[in-house]
């Protein structure tokens, strides 16, 4: 069971990296420092919104798996 848990944690972490890298480059911090005033108040639509929500879900799954792995390791 420990091996399956660790494999799942590795796969979810790779998926989280991919989802973060797929997000648009326009949402960087440069707009917050005077680069593009319209970038601060930006409505996500379509694929951008889906990637944003998917990032949140995958990150939550990663946190839960990491906590479960820590509990299994501490036994």
Image (cartoon, grey):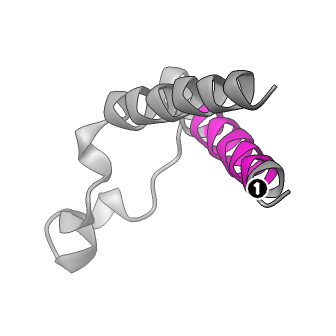
User: What residue is rendered at 28% in x and 73% in y?
Assistant: 32
Foreground: 27 or 71? 71
Residue range highlighted in magenta: 53-70
Quadrant in the rendering for residue 53: top right
69 lies left or right of 37: right
User: What residue is rendered at 72% in x and 21% in y?
Assistant: 4
Please state, as top left, top right, bottom left or bottom right, where the C terminus lies in the image.
bottom right
Residue indicated by mark 1:
67
User: What residue is rendered at 61% in x and 23% in y?
Assistant: 7
Circle 1 — which element? helix
User: What residue is rendered at 45% in x and 52% in y?
Assistant: 42
Q: Callout 1: 10 Å neighbours few (<14), some, many (20+)? A: few
Magenta includes 74? no
Foreground: 20 or 70? 70
Q: Position of residue 71 (x, y in %)?
A: 83, 56
Q: Main secondary structure of the magenta part?
A: helix
Is 69 drawn above or below residue 70 in the view shown? above
28 lies left or right of 6: left
Please state, as top left, top right, bottom left or bottom right, where the N terminus lies in the image.
top right
Q: Position of residue 33 (x, y in %)?
A: 19, 78
């Amino acid at each position: 069971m420990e091996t399956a848990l660790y494999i799942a944690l590795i796969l979810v972490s790779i998926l989280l990296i991919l989802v973060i890298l797929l997000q648009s480059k326009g949402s960087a911090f440069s707009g917050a420092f005077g680069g593009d005033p319209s970038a601060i108040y930006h409505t996500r639509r379509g694929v951008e919104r889906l990637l944003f929500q998917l990032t949140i879900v995958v990150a939550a799954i990663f946190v839960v798996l990491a906590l479960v792995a820590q509990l299994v390791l501490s036994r």
